[in-house]
Image (cartoon, coloured by chain):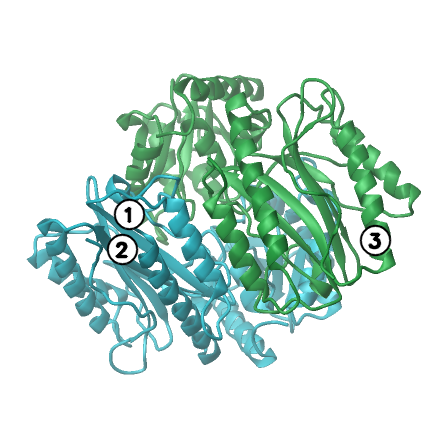
Chain colours: A cyan, B green
Amino acid sequence: MPAFSAAEYRDRIARVKRRMEAAGIDVLLCAEPASLNYLCGYDGWSFYVHQFLVLSLSMDEPLWVGREMDAAGARLTTYLKPESIEPYPEDFVDAPDRHPARFVAELMKRRGYGRARIGLELDAFYFTGRSYTELTKALPDSRLIDVFPLVNWARIVKSDAEIEMMRGAAAIVSHAMEVGMAAVAPGVRECDAVAEICAAQLHGTGPYWGDYPSALPSVPSGVKSAAPHLTWSGDRYQPDSVAYLELGGCHHRYHAALARTLYLGKPPQRLADLAKVVSEGLDHALDAARTGRTCHEVEAAWRAVIERADHSKSSRIGYSIGLSYPPDWGERTASLRQGDRTVLEPNMCFHMILGMWREDWGFELSETFRVTPAGPPEILTRFPRDMVVKD
Amino acid sequence: MPAFSAAEYRDRIARVKRRMEAAGIDVLLCAEPASLNYLCGYDGWSFYVHQFLVLSLSMDEPLWVGREMDAAGARLTTYLKPESIEPYPEDFVDAPDRHPARFVAELMKRRGYGRARIGLELDAFYFTGRSYTELTKALPDSRLIDVFPLVNWARIVKSDAEIEMMRGAAAIVSHAMEVGMAAVAPGVRECDAVAEICAAQLHGTGPYWGDYPSALPSVPSGVKSAAPHLTWSGDRYQPDSVAYLELGGCHHRYHAALARTLYLGKPPQRLADLAKVVSEGLDHALDAARTGRTCHEVEAAWRAVIERADHSKSSRIGYSIGLSYPPDWGERTASLRQGDRTVLEPNMCFHMILGMWREDWGFELSETFRVTPAGPPEILTRFPRDMVVKD
C-alpha cells in the first residue's frame, strides 16, 4: 500500500544514508511527518501525538515508533516488516509523567545506539523542546547532533515517479482555481467560496484523487488582502475590492500551489500597473530558473524588473515544494531569495510566489514549476496569468 | 476584530497570570497557536513559521512576535496596541544561520527579562528543540522553566461566550455528519465523500460560518477502519463493509467532534452486539460526567459496562476540547482515563470517543459535551446514536 515501489524507497534510504555519513552520524532520528513518509511510506493524521523514525547506517530498513493505536496504520501504509514497527503504550499520550521521546531513547539503547552519534531534526515542527530535553537526559553517552533539514535536502530532487505526483497535484490546484474564481463574487461569503474550493481540491480531477493540502486556502479581500495568512470568516466579498486566492493541490501528499488575483469591479490603475510589472517579473524569474543557476540568480532576475518600476519586496519569492504535511507545503530548504546559493538541479520543484502586500491591500501571482535538464522550467500549474476582473 | 470582548481577554490574562505566579515564573513565552489566540486574539495560518507571545506579570497586554509579513494580520485580528506587535525580519524564515527564537530572546533582554524566570511551553508542537537550544544559549542568566500546558489548563473551563462558540461548532459537525452519512455508499470514492463533508463543514449551518477544523475527516472503511488515523484515498466504498465517520466542526477556532459508524449491507452479529454495548457504555459514562466527579470516575463508568460484556479498551475514552489549531482539536490537558484525577467543573467540554479497533475492523461512537453546574452534561452534538445501516 505505500505509494511508491520498493526500489524507490531503497534508493531514498541509500541517499539519506550518504547524507548521514557526510554529517558524521550513525543514527538518524526523524520526527517530521514528511521524513517518515519519505523513508517508509507511513501516512496518517497521527502527528498530533509524538512519532518517530529511527534509521541507522547498519539497518536495511528504518524503525517506525508511534502510538499503539497507530501501529495498524503503520502496517497498512508502509513496506516495513512487523518487527520494524515499535508502538509505545497508550498511557504515553498527553501524560505529564512519561514521554514518547523517553520511549524511543530506551529503544535506541536496547538496539545498541546508547553511545552513538545521533542526528536530530532539531527544528522540525513536532520535534518539541521536551522531546529534546528527554533525549538528552535518557541518552547521556550519545552525541546528539542537529542535522535538520537533512532529509528535506534529500527530498528536494524528485524522482520521475514523484514528478508524476507533482503533476497530479498541479492538475488539482489548477482545477480548484477555476472553481474558486467562479465562486468569488460580491455578496458571497468567504466561507462559501472556500467550501467550493475545498470540495474541488478533494474531489480532485481526472485520474488524480484529492489528498488534503498542507495549508488551507487563503482567500482574503479588501483590507484583509494586506495580510497574507489570514484565514476566512463569514464576511461577504464587497464590490470594488481586490481579492486573491492562494491554493494548494495535493495528491499522495505531493503538493503544487497556485495564486491568482481578482478584482470585483473596475481595477484601479495602480493595481493594473502593479499586475503588469509582477507578471513581467514572473516571466523573467521563471526563465532564469534553469539547471546550474542559483536561487539567488533567479531572485535577481525578478528584482531587476521590479526595481526598474520602483517597486520592492523584502520577502523571498519562492521555496522548494513537494511532499509535506501540515502546516506547510514548503520543504524548508532552498528559498528563492538574495544570498541563497543553492544550485538548481533537474527535478527540483519550486513554488514561485510573488506576493506584494501594501498597507491596506495585496496582490499575488504564482506558479509551481519543475527544473528541467536544459532550458526553461516546466510550469506544472495551468491558469491564465492575467488578473481576473469581475465587473 | 478579535472574536471576544476586551473584558474577556482581560479576564483570560488575569487567570493566566495567577497560574504564572503559582508556577513561580515572571514571564511566559508561548508558542502554541491556541495560546496566542487565547491571550490576544491572533488568528492566521502563520504557524508554519515560528511565532511567539510574551506575557510578563508586569505587562497589561502581551507582546506578539512573528514574521514581518504577518504583522498586518496581528494588527487586524488582535486588540494589541501597535507597540505590542514585534515582527522579526523576513530573512529569519527558513534560514540556517539565524533563528526567530534568538530574536525573541534578544527582545526579552531589551525589555528587562534577561535575568527573569521564564516559563516555556516545552512540549507544545511548534516549539521546536531548536527554539529551546537557541533560548538557552541567548538567555544564559535566565531560568527557563517548563510550564506546559499552563495556558491549556486555563482554557479548559470556558466562559459563556466560548460555550456559544462550542454550540456553533457542534451545530456544524452535526450537520456535516448528516451530509457524510448521505454521501457514503458502495461505489463512492472516499475522496468524494470527504469533499462533500468538508464543504458542509466550511459552509457551516444557520448563523454559524464554518472555520477549518484542526483535523481532517476520518472516513475509513473495511480493513482500514482498524487504523484510527488513516486518511482517505481514491478507493471506493465496498458493499458489506463497516465504515465510520469521525468529524470536526469549527467556529471561530472552537471545536466540537462527532463520530458515528455505518454498515453498507446487513451488519454482522458481532458488530451489532458491540454497537449495543458501546452505546450502553456511552450512556453510563455521560451520566457520570458531572461537576465534582473525576475523569477517572467517568472512565470507570464506561469500563464497568464493557467489562461485563467481556470487552476492553486500552486507550482513553476522551479528552478536553475547545480552542485549537492543527494538528489537534484536543486541549492536551484532562483525559477521560484511568488515573486521571482531574475534577470536572462547569463549562469544561470534552469529546467522549469510544473507538473500538480490532485486528481488521473498527467501530466508533462519540459525543461532545459540556459539564453543567448540576446534573448530567449538556450534549452539544446532535445525531442519532444507532449505527447507520445502508442495506
Q: Which residue is mark 1?
A: B90
Please state which amino acid type lies under the numbered disc 1: Glu
Q: At numbered mark 1, what does the secondary structure look like: helix, strand or loop?
A: helix
Circles 2 and 3 on the same subunit: no
Q: Is residue A275 above or below residue B366?
A: below
Taking the spot 49% from the left edge, 37% from the top edge, the residue there is: B206
Q: Position of residue A182 (x, y in %)?
A: 32, 58
For disc 1, the chain is: B
Q: Are marks 2 and 3 in contact (CB under 8 Å)?
A: no
Q: Is residue B222 at all visible to an observer of this figure?
A: yes
- Work out how far the residue at label 1 is from the one at label 3, CA to CA, in angstroms: 57 Å
Q: Element at badge 3? A: helix
Q: Is residue A204 left or right of residue B88?
A: right
The mark nearer the N terminus, 1 or 3, is 1
Q: Is residue B102 above or below residue A74?
A: above
Tell me what residue is drawn at x 28 percent, y 47 percent. Answer: B90
Residue A390, relative to residue B238: is it above or below? above
> Going 64% across and 38% down the picture, which residue do you hit?
B382
Do tag 2 and tag 1 residues touch (Cβ < 8 Å)?
yes
Q: Are marks 2 and 1 on the same chain?
A: no
Of residues B191 and A33, which is closer to you in this image? B191
Q: Which residue is mark 3?
A: B272
Query: Mark number for residue A345?
Result: none
Q: Quadrant of the N terminus of chain A?
A: bottom right
